[in-house]
Amino acid sequence: MVHSMGFVSAGPVVYFGTGKNTRKYQNIEKNPSVAFTVDEDSLDVFKITGIQMEGKASFVGSH
């Protein structure tokens, strides 16, 4: 399942925000294995850049 999300990073750690009542939260509770991509679009397809990351998600903050 794919969802758009805002994020911030602190070194190698990436933080995403979502509410407890969202499908994203429920999916992570069921399976913490996640993947995400960040890209920079361009009208010239040869200039599109991006990365893909995979890892394990965990909850921080109030949940």
Image: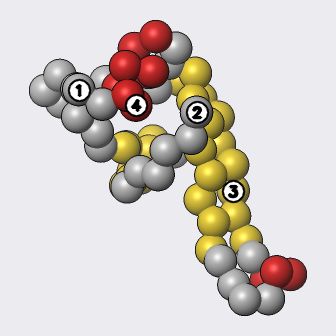
Could you say where residue 5 lies in the image, as x and y percent from the top left?
A: 41, 51
Q: Which one is closest to the eye, mark 3 or mark 1?
A: 1
Amino acid type, label 3: Ile
Amino acid type, label 2: Met
Label 2 element class: loop
Dot 3: few (<14), some (14–19), or many (≥20) neighbours within 10 Å? few
| Sequence-earlier tag: 2 or 3 | 2
The residue that disc 1 covers is 21
The residue that disc 4 covers is 24
Separation of residues labelled 3 and 1 (CA atoms): 29 Å
Q: Tell me the residue at 63%/66% (across/down).
A: 39
Amino acid type, label 4: Lys
Label 4 element class: helix
Which quadrant holds residue 36? top right
Q: Tell me the residue at 40%/14% (across/down).
A: 29
The disc label shown at residue 9, or none: none
Dot 1: few (<14), some (14–19), or many (≥20) neighbours within 10 Å? few
Q: Tell me the residue at 17%/22% (across/down).
A: 63
The residue that disc 2 covers is 1
